[in-house]
Image: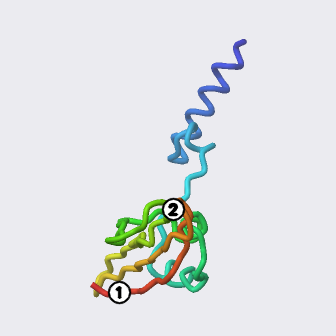
Amino acid sequence: MQRIPIVLAFTVLSSLLCGCDPASAQISRSDPTLSLPQAERVSADLKQGMTVDEVQKLLGKPLRTALKGDDIVPAGSPSKGTLQWTYSWAGSSSGRSLRIDFIAKSLEDWQVNSWEWQTF
């Protein structure tokens, strides 16, 4: 029983000396945000027909989303609208963004139709 306070004190003291929190030492945290060079490299793997989930695994969550519907859609037909995802990176010289357009193959089934890099 006397060893527990000594071991606990040693653990706390050693974590203070190394500059880390003992609780956070067990948690692995990675930054989900891609840098612009990383995004440019992985965007080469984009393909028409990829699903929303596949794109999110490749690039992460988008910064902005937009849904553009068709004016006239027959009742019972899937929308022929466009889902747009935008990823943005602000750089020292200029900002870049990647816009991905998805089309609905069926209700809830969005697939990549096109994508475009833009400078802002």
Q: Residue at x 63, y 43 (%)?
A: 26
Q: Is residue 35 left or right of residue 58?
A: left
Q: From the image, tell me which residue sits under label 1.
A: 118
User: Mark 2 to mark 1: distance in Å?
Assistant: 22 Å
Q: Quadrant of residue 79?
A: bottom left
Q: Which amino acid type is shown beneath numbered disc 1?
A: Gln
Q: Secondary structure at mark 1?
A: strand
- Provide residue 120's location: percent of width, then percent of height: 27, 84
Q: Residue at x 46, y 74 (%)?
A: 35
Color encoding of the figure: rainbow
Q: Is residue 90 left or right of residue 84?
A: left
Q: Which amino acid type is shown beneath numbered disc 2?
A: Pro
Q: Nearer the viewer, residue 82 or 74?
A: 74
Mark 2 vs mark 1: in front: 1
Q: Residue at x 57, y 37 (%)?
A: 23
Q: From the image, tell me which residue sits under label 2.
A: 32
Label 2: how many Cα within 10 Å (few below 14, some 14–19, many 20+): few
Q: Is residue 79 left or right of residue 97?
A: right
Q: Secondary structure at mark 2?
A: loop
Q: Nearer the viewer, residue 105 or 57?
A: 105
- Provide residue 115's location: percent of width, then percent of height: 46, 83
Q: Does residue 16 sit above or below 32 in this rendering?
A: above
- Provide residue 57's location: percent of width, then percent of height: 59, 65
Label 1: how many Cα within 10 Å (few below 14, some 14–19, many 20+): few
Q: Residue furthest top?
A: 1
Give yes or no for contact between labels 2 and 1 (Cβ–Cβ under 8 Å): no
